[in-house]
Image: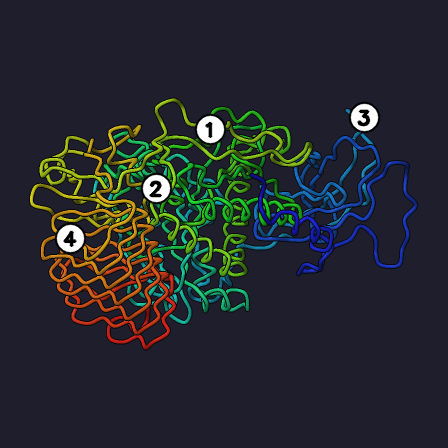
């Protein structure tokens, strides 16, 4: 499915590319001077400096096959201080608009001075160079004479000769925390070998004090280093954190005044220290975000439950020298709500492709140009896990080597600088996208939550949504494989819930590092799923916001499930005349009850897509799930010992939830004709930042919902 808003952006693209950019570009000729052009000579070369890169733009030469970018180090007087080098090759598949070619030249040491020239080629026949343009590249951000701003990473101080060690990272993060009121560094867990997993929480003028308060700001998250031998994104994150901590430019203040940025620089500290892909046990952590067998992934998923980011980016490196600079991919698993997939794809195709054409970077779908069997549907991969958790997000891959389009990257430092500063560009674009499109992001998330709690549609255990190609020669002409569900990977008749035995739920596990293994109960709690305790086991209803992920872990048909739990199907469909008394476990799906419903103490009601022409009252219930349903009378739930979930319900009367002892009641996206009142609940009700529409007053613990 092509990006649903790309058409709008393509109409605006010409204007976007022509817009003024600060600082003002350097030109090949002074204003008012017309140079005598040689045949096929590139004209109107401009160079605009960015953070660790320079954007070159020029007027295209008719019939040119590609263009070569030459860079020469020069002194202030223009004399060369080193040899001229071909640092880049522009090809038509780099950007979505070939009429305004741009190239992000990178790999140099920031702050140095250079001269640039560009020449066209017809096949392998080189044409005359443009007139030269000289300029000094932007120095690393932060005034070296201002405390805080003068902090630098080990990677920066060694001019990319060394990556920042774990010891240096902890010192740097601590220094940022101590020097800036905007930053709080919190430890979200420890690695298998006991290294702290730190997270920046950044807001203005100070970050919100609690995870719930951060969640209320619709935060965005960047996960920077899951594979220990792919550290380029991590260095970008550390630099970005410094700028967010100290910059007083209008963009930064505006951004941090409206949201909170959370950055996890190194989830895999053990792998980073050893320069290995996996953690200390050899586990690829990006194949464990659903199963959370490892302490690192458990910590990150537990953080997601608490901080509830609405959008995210996940940084990696890609060993393909012929791909784009920045392969990206949305959450493709078919259980991801379409609204999340669409908004994620729009962030990539509608924004990153457009801004890449403006600034000279080459984003493309992961797998582009000979990428192979990548970008598939495993729910264990973070981009898919996040999508199944209703988070708009993208994978980011940094092309590991320059290849033929960046021929100067046989120099290791040049290669490392290009990767890191291309990541920094991407993460900054992500911040801007979130700021400009927060309404669309939160709407997509709300739509996804209401879709998931309805427990409608088939369950796909493995299978991806397709990524359609852009017409050649634009980026995306070689998208990742289709990855359609195979036989046996679709369940058309979804159950109401899954039932686990005591052993399945609380029994000891053999997966995960010895001494650090967690039970299924602990893992489901980290995911934030509601579980009902029954007389003979534990029931996990599917009428929950993360419905698309639950069966992948609890159904024996799942490709990588935790347990083979029992499927529990609806106990009532169709019509029921008169009063309904619920004892034990009762599941209504698309049912109509023409009378009141009373849930007895210790019983559980799960009602999805149903109509109840009367009141719903539950006192001392083990659990109440009322989703995507209509109630013509009041809803009163008191003294529940287990979870209370009322989402996307229409209630023609008051709603009262009081004295619940089974965790925070979830009340979201409901339409209530009367008042909404809550009091005495052991944990205050939450709405996952999806507001309720209430005609009457909202009071007590529900006043803010």
Task: Give the CA separation, mark 1 to mark 4.
Answer: 49 Å
Q: Name the mark nearer the viewer: 3 or 1.
A: 1
From the top left corner, tell me how far across and down residue 137 is, in percent: 63, 52
Q: SS for tag 3?
A: strand
- Tell me if mark 1 has few (under 14), some (14-19) or many (20+) residues whose alpha carbon lies within 10 angstroms of its own: few
Using residue 510 as the reference point, say whether residue 550 is left or right of it: right
Point 16% across, 70% down: residue: 680
The residue under label 3 is 125
Point 36% across, 29% down: residue: 490
Q: Name the mark nearer the viewer: 1 or 4.
A: 4
Name the quarter where the C terminus is drawn.
Answer: bottom left
Q: Where on the picture, by quarter, is residue 663?
A: bottom left
Q: SS for tag 2?
A: loop
Which disc number belongs to residue 582? 4
The residue under label 1 is 374
The residue under label 2 is 548
Which of the two labelled residues, at mark 3 and mark 1, occupies the earlier sequence position? 3
Which of the two labelled residues, at mark 2 and mark 4, occupies the earlier sequence position? 2
Which of the two labelled residues, at mark 1 and mark 4, occupies the earlier sequence position? 1
From the top left corner, tell me how far across and down residue 68 is, in percent: 73, 35
Task: Give the CA separation, mark 3 to mark 1.
Answer: 36 Å
- Furthest residue in direction top, as rendered: 487
Which disc number belongs to residue 16? none
Out of 512 and 630, give the one closest to the viewer.
630
Q: Where on the picture, by quarter, is residue 96?
A: top right
From the top left corner, tell me how far across and down residue 116 is, in percent: 72, 44
From the top left corner, tell me how far across and down residue 591 is, in percent: 29, 49
Using residue 604 as the reference point, say whether residue 276 is left or right of it: right
Which of the two labelled residues, at mark 2 and mark 3, occupies the earlier sequence position? 3
Using residue 51 as the reference point, say whether residue 187 is left or right of it: left
């Amino acid at each position: 499915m092509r990006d649903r808003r790309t058409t709008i952006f393509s109409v605006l693209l010409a204007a976007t590319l022509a817009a003024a950019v600060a600082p003002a570009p350097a030109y090949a000729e002074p204003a008012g001077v017309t140079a005598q052009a040689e045949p096929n000579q590139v004209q109107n070369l401009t160079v605009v400096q960015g953070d660790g890169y320079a954007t070159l733009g020029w007027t295209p030469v008719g019939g040119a096959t590609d263009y070569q970018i030459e860079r020469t180090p020069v002194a202030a007087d223009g004399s060369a201080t080193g040899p001229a080098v071909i640092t880049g090759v522009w090809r038509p598949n780099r950007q979505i608009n070939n009429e305004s070619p741009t190239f992000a030249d990178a790999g140099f040491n920031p702050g140095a001075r250079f001269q640039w020239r560009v020449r066209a080629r017809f096949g392998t026949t080189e044409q005359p160079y443009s007139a030269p343009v000289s300029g000094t590249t932007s120095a690393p951000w932060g005034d070296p004479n201002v405390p805080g701003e003068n902090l630098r990473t080990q990677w920066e101080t060694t001019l990319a000769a060394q990556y920042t060690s774990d010891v240096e990272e902890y010192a740097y993060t601590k220094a940022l925390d101590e020097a800036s009121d905007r930053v709080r560094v919190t430890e979200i867990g420890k690695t298998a070998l006991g290294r702290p997993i730190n997270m920046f929480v950044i807001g203005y003028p100070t970050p919100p004090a609690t995870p719930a308060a951060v969640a209320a700001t619709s935060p965005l998250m960047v996960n920077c280093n899951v594979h220990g031998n792919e550290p380029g994104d991590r260095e970008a994150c550390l630099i970005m954190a410094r700028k967010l901590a100290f910059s007083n430019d209008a963009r930064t203040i505006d951004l941090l005044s409206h949201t909170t940025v959370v950055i996890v620089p190194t989830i895999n500290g053990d792998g980073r220290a050893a320069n290995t892909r996996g953690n200390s046990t050899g586990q690829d952590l990006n194949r464990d975000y659903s199963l959370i067998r490892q302490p690192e992934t458990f910590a990150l998923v537990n953080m997601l439950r608490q901080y509830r980011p609405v959008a995210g980016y996940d940084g990696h490196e890609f060993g393909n020298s012929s791909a784009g600079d920045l392969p990206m991919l949305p959450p493709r698993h078919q259980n991801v709500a379409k609204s999340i997939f669409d908004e994620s794809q729009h962030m990539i195709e509608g924004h990153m492709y457009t801004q890449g054409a403006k600034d000279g970077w080459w984003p493309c779908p992961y797998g582009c140009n000979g990428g192979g069997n990548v970008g598939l549907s495993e729910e264990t991969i973070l981009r898919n896990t996040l999508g199944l958790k209703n988070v708009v997000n993208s994978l980011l891959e940094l092309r590991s080597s320059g290849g033929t389009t960046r021929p100067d990257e046989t120099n290791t430092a040049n290669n490392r600088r290009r990767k890191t500063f291309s990541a920094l560009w991407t993460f900054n674009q992500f911040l801007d996208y979130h700021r400009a499109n927060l309404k669309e992001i939160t709407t997509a998330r709300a739509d996804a939550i209401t879709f998931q709690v309805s427990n409608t549609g088939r369950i796909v255990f493995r299978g991806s949504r397709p990524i359609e190609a852009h017409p050649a020669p634009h980026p995306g002409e070689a998208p990742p494989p289709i990855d359609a569900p195979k036989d046996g990977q679709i369940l058309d008749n979804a159950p109401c819930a899954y039932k686990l035995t005591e052993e399945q739920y609380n029994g000891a596990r053999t997966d995960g590092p010895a001494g650090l293994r967690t039970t299924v109960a602990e893992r489901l709690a980290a995911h934030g799923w509601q579980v009902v305790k029954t007389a003979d086991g534990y029931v996990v209803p599917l009428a929950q916001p993360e419905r698309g992920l639950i069966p992948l872990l609890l159904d024996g048909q799942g490709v990588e499930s935790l347990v083979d739990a029992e499927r529990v199907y609806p106990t009532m469909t169709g019509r029921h005349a008169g009063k309904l008394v619920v004892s034990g476990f009762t599941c209504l799906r698309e049912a109509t009850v023409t009378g009141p419903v009373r849930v007895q103490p210790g019983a559980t009601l799960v009602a999805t897509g149903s109509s109840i022409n009367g009141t719903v009252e539950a006192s001392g219930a083990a659990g109440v799930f009322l989703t995507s349903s209509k109630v013509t009378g009041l809803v009163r739930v008191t003294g529940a010992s287990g979870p209370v979930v009322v989402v996307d319900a229409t209630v023609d009367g008051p709603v009262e939830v009081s004295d619940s002892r089974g965790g925070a009641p979830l009340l979201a996206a409901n339409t209530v004709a009367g008042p909404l009142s809550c009091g005495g609940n052991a944990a205050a009700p939450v709405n996952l930042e999806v507001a309720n529409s209430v005609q009457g007053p909202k009071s007590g613990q529900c006043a803010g919902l």
